[in-house]
Image: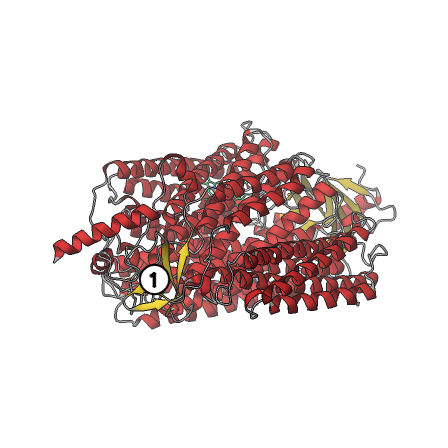
């Protein structure tokens, strides 16, 4: 029996490997597999961490004595700006994306993420954008206005070089990967789970990432909008932030922190999710308070979107308004406390064993609790008056970020690197490394609370030669060298692990989650067949399940027509719903990312002709992605094993790509909403309003345009239900309506005499361009639908392409109508003052 | 013994400081903030010790915490403990903030305009006939509030006088207000807290707090010695 079962496993393994594997040599550049890309994300992020850490050490070297001649102020500015930027954008976010990409399918019981090529595209965008920033550092033209790039310092007048452009463009390039990862993670969690795994049975890490990715979808767009606006101001003189022309530097701060605060929780939550996954294993029992933790997470997600003003207590906002944000900031401590006590409860009701991940949990708890406490302190307006922009804040943010991210991630590394290598940690250097990092960290940063309160401002490369400051800073720098040696040992420890780690067979930690129900290192297809989950998915028995799945006893335990198949479930309940056919490895993500890079480089070097053409190339390449995807005939329900048949995702009403479109549009709408907020904010807050240079909309044209938008929605809608060739007419009509919309808005934008004269004109101009751009994209979608329908990829069952298009059409026409409303609003308000 | 240590901590931690330490206040506002800080500091030590103590307990004495049901752990630790602490703290800081950040000027305050530019502070005294100006030195009388209005010519700066507990950004296009009140005469440090370019580090200024008569005399002479 076992003999035949073993033989069957091996045969299945060979068949699956042949179609899921990534090729050797150059074919690696075509990799789309989540294990491969996840590891690439994490390795690249680790390298950026080393570079950022090195820059941190340079800072500490400079600050070791009061009048240090080591760096001059310009270089120091580049170093601290790049340190902060690298740590936040090129280390923390990509690291958590990598972790999620690698783990999620395995925890959820799927063979891959929903959009493997998008994963790869995101990785390349991250790599190229990050490289842009590093190259700037190497050439000495790195950004130097601080990691939050406050304008006017970052404006063309006060930063005439390309330094600030490198930041705005490079980071926006990298953000493409953050957004694409967020959408992909959301969809994969909601759809690509093992059958039977309802949301309530999901391993807790899934909940953490669901909330995190949701926050990313609405957190990043304000920053992306801000970066676009600032780049437009720098490149084309549109005065969004210039107080002399109706702009306001505070608009940048709002947009930045609308992103910046959620960002901190975006970084913390996945790390906490890793803890909630490995801590129960070492406690020997499932996580206590699963529901309470889920509620806490969701509360945290919502609260964190309403806190951004606590970075702006001293910009002149009335105290009453500040109190609201202060209260919200303090309240965030509650869901955090809920999690901490859920962990303590888990340990108290289990039989805890100490091990390396738990050692890092101890480090996390110690440091993060202090960071949380100082966080409550700086949330108090009176105290923040003193602490703001001092080294107290530097101390606080490192306690939160290093405690809340680096330590948990190192714990997670000791826990999951064995999954990637199939070997156990060696254990000689790990403990000394931990203690050096831990002690070094506390020595370095605890003291900064004090230097801050003693009047040491952040971002200053010299300080008064007082014995107090001098000694404290010196000790702090010594601590940072101890920490650096600790990180060196850690690196060595992992090198030893890769080389000498003892191999194990399966599930070395006796975990109860699905990622251990597979061979380690994992095969590219992850699961030879997919499990059916009937209990909470952190109470499973991976050893038993693993053998069954390997033998093909789960769903999809076979290879069909060489397809890469996995299952999708109904989002909440977890009933099997469709079989998803994933795309094969492809060079297209790389090429598309390169083309995207051409756009960003052309913007950077102000070759605007190329910058205008590159997006066309990107669109063409994206269209190329779709060639050959889909079916030429209706196939109906397909057998997925265990006596179940479900339709293919090409025929499903709720295919993953429809969900993805929805989330992408939510992100897009958030960006647009931020713009509307920006316009109203300028009207309320900026000097130089009301203004006579407000472009006025035309009544008749507006009505006509509204009619077109309404018709557009209608005709896009009509293309779905009608069968056969009948849908070509509404699609063609949609094309025409988009074209009309595009011309209307482009013409309206061009009719604005001089958008550089006043922020009012610039804002309206931007909104009009936004609507025109969406009409242009809608045109592509409608044309694409027409082409797919005409070439036989669409039937009354296979409607996926049209359904995705429909969502976009509806959004684009709605955006057109809202743009018009916004224009009228601005024209009305911009001519009047604020009601006193 | 223990109270002595508790009392000694602030002395040690704030001792040996220069003339720009928030822990070494020279006015009632800064003193109130410093008091808030020490209260929060000690409360934090207690909370920190509590969490770490519980962690030590559950790790070192397995089963010791099992008598308390899981739900209680989470409810007490996650809700009943933080909520009252946070509420109390919020009320205190709301009251204190309302007092510190009262944006409308009080009647007898001396009015000064602080105009920031890369990398210099220009103080203009609005209450004197000829509106004299001092650069990188702020003169003020003791025991009388000074209402400083900050403006900026170029980028964002931030005026900070740690010993008086005042900090406010100087944002181009905006006029912000901060009240400074000293109850000690002396020569104190002030600085720019917001990064404003390569001269940021050296954008420091002095705050000279005089006896009222001496200040009036200086003001009348337009601060020329
Ligand atoms: C090797 C360990 C590290 C050292 C020695 C270090 C040191 C420092 C120092 C001294 C500053 C203050 C610079 C100044 O204001 O003049 C700073 C700023 C900063 N650090 Fe770190 N840091 C380390 C790790 C990290 C990590 C892991 C993160 C985030 C995940 C981080 C994020 C930041 C940020 C965002 C800033 C603010 C930068 C700015 O003001 O623009 N650091 N770091
Ligand atoms: Cu924040
Ligand atoms: Cu400054």
- Which residue: 39% across, 58% down? A273
Residue A517 higher or lower than A125, as above or below: below
Q: Quadrant of the C terminus of chain A?
A: bottom right
Indicate the colouring scheme: secondary structure
**Residue holding disc 1:** A343
Q: Would residue B181 be visible to someone looking at this image?
A: no
Q: From this view, report whether residue B147 is shown above or below residue A476.
A: below
Position of residue A486 measured from the top left corner of the image (x, y, whole percent):
35, 38
Name the side, left or right, on which B222 lies relative to A448.
right
A208 or A514: nearer the eye? A514
Q: Quadrant of residue A782?
A: bottom right
Q: Could you tell me which secondary element the residue under label 1 belongs to?
A: helix
Query: How far across and how far down the image is residue A347, in percent?
Result: 28, 62
Measured as percent of width and height from the top left, residue B28 is found at: 63, 56
Q: Nearer the viewer, residue A394 or A717?
A: A717
Q: Local crowd at mark 1 within 10 Å, few (<14), some, or many (≥20)?
A: many
| Foreground pick, A4 / B51 | A4
Where does residue B26 sit, x and y in percent of width and height? Answer: 62, 50
Which chain is home to disc 1? A
Can you tell me which quadrant of the image ligand 2 is in? bottom right
Which of A196/A129 is in front?
A196
Q: Is residue A727 left or right of residue A60?
A: right
Image quarter (top left, top right, bottom left or bottom right) of the N terminus of chain A: bottom left
């Amino acid at each position: 029996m076992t003999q035949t079962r073993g033989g069957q496993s091996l045969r299945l393994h060979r068949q699956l490997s042949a179609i899921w594997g990534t090729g050797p040599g150059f074919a690696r550049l075509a990799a789309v597999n989540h294990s491969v890309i996840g590891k690439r994300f994490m390795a690249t992020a680790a390298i950026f961490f080393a570079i950022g850490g090195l820059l941190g050490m340079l800072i500490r070297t400079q600050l070791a004595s009061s009048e240090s001649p080591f760096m001059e102020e310009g270089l120091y500015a580049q170093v601290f700006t790049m340190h902060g930027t690298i740590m936040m954008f090129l280390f923390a976010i990509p690291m958590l994306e990598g972790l999620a990409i690698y783990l999620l399918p395995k925890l959820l019981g799927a063979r891959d993420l929903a959009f493997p090529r998008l994963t790869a595209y995101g990785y390349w965008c991250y790599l190229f954008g990050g490289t842009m920033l590093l190259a700037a550092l190497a050439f000495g033209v790195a950004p130097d206005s601080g990691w939050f790039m406050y304008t006017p310092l970052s404006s063309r007048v006060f930063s005439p070089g390309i330094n600030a452009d490198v930041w705005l463009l490079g980071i926006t390039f990298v953000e493409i990967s953050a957004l694409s990862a967020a959408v992909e993670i959301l969809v994969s969690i909601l759809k690509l789970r093992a059958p039977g795994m309802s949301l309530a049975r999901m391993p807790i890490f899934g909940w953490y990432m669901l909330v995190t990715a949701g926050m990313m979808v609405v957190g990043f767009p304000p920053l992306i909008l801000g970066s676009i606006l600032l780049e437009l101001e720098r490149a084309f003189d549109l005065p969004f932030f210039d107080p002399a022309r109706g702009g306001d530097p505070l608009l940048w701060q709002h947009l930045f922190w609308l992103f910046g605060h959620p960002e901190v929780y975006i970084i913390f939550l996945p790390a906490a999710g890793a803890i909630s996954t490995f801590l129960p294993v070492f406690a020997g029992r499932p996580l206590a308070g699963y529901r309470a933790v889920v509620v806490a997470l969701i509360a945290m997600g919502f609260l964190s979107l309403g806190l951004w003003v606590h970075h702006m207590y001293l910009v002149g906002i009335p105290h009453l308004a500040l109190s609201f944000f202060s209260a919200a900031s303090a309240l965030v401590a509650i869901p955090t406390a809920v999690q901490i006590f859920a962990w303590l409860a888990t340990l108290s009701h289990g039989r805890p064993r100490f091990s390396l991940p738990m050692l890092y949990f101890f480090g996390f708890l110690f440091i993060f609790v202090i960071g949380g406490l100082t966080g409550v302190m700086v949330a108090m307006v009176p105290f923040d008056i003193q602490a703001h922009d001092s080294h107290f804040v530097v101390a606080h943010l490192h306690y939160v970020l290093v405690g809340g991210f680096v330590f948990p991630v190192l714990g997670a590394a000791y826990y999951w690197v064995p999954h990637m290598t199939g070997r156990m940690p060696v254990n000689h250097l790990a403990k000394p490394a931990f203690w050096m990092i831990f002690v070094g960290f506390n020595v370095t940063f605890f003291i900064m609370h004090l230097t801050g309160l003693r009047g040491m401002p952040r971002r200053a490369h010299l300080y008064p030669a007082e014995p107090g400051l001098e000694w404290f800073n010196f000790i702090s720098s010594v601590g940072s060298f101890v920490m650096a040696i600790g990180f060196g040992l850690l690196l060595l420890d992992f090198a030893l692990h890769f080389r000498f780690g003892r191999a194990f067979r399966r599930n070395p930690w006796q975990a109860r989650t699905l990622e251990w129900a597979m061979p380690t290192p994992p095969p590219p297809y992850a699961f030879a067949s997919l499990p059916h989950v009937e209990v909470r998915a952190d109470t499973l028995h991976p050893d038993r399940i693993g053998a069954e799945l390997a033998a093909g006893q789960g769903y999809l335990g076979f290879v069909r027509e060489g397809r890469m198949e996995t299952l999708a479930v109904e989002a909440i309940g977890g009933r099997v719903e469709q079989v998803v056919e994933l795309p094969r490895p492809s060079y297209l993500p790389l090429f598309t990312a390169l083309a995207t890079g051409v756009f960003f480089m052309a913007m950077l070097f102000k070759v605007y002709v190329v910058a205008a053409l590159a997006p066309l190339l990107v669109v063409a390449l994206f269209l190329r992605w779709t060639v050959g995807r889909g079916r030429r005939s209706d196939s109906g329900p397909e057998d997925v094993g265990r006596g179940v048949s479900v339709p293919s995702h090409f025929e499903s009403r709720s295919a993953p790509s429809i969900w993805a479109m929805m989330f992408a549009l939510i992100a897009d709408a958030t960006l647009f909403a931020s713009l509307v907020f920006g316009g109203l904010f300028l009207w309320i807050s900026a000097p130089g309003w009301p203004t006579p240079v407000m472009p006025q909309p035309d009544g008749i044209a507006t009505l006509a345009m509204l009619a077109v938008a309404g018709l557009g929605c209608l005709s896009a809608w009509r293309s779905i239900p009608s069968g056969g060739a009948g849908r070509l007419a509404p699609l063609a009509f949609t094309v025409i309506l988009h074209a009309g919309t595009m011309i209307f808005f482009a013409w309206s934008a061009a009719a604005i005499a001089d958008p550089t004269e006043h922020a009012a004109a610039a804002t309206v101009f931007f909104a009009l361009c936004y609507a025109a751009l969406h009409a242009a994209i809608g045109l592509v979608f409608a044309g694409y639908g027409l082409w797919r329908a005409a070439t036989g990829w669409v039937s009354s069952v296979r409607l996926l392409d049209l359904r995705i298009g429909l969502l976009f059409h509806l959004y684009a026409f709605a955006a057109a109508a809202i743009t018009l409303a916004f224009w009228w609003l601005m024209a009305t308000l911009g001519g009047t003052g604020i009601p006193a | 013994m223990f109270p002595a240590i508790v009392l000694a901590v602030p002395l040690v931690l704030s001792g040996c400081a220069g003339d720009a330490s928030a822990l070494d206040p020279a006015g009632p506002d800064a003193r109130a903030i410093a008091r808030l800080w020490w209260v929060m500091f000690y409360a934090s030590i207690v909370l920190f010790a509590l969490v770490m103590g519980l962690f030590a307990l559950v790790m070192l004495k397995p089963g010791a915490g099992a008598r308390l049901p899981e739900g209680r752990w989470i409810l007490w630790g996650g809700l009943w403990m933080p909520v009252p602490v946070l509420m109390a703290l919020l009320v205190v800081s709301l009251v204190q903030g309302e007092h510190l950040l009262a944006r409308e000027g009080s009647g007898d305050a001396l009015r000064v305009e602080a105009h920031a530019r890369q990398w210099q502070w220009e103080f203009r005294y609005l209450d004197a006939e000829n509106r004299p100006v001092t650069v990188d030195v702020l003169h003020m009388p003791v025991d009388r509030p000074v209402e400083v209005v900050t403006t900026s010519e170029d980028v964002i700066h931030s005026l900070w006088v740690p010993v008086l507990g005042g900090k406010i950004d100087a944002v181009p296009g905006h006029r912000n207000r901060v009240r400074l009140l000293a109850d000690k005469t002396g020569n104190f440090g002030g600085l720019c807290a917001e990064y404003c370019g390569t001269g940021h580090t050296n954008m420091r200024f002095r705050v000279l707090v005089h006896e009222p008569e001496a200040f009036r005399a200086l003001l009348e002479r337009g601060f020329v010695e």
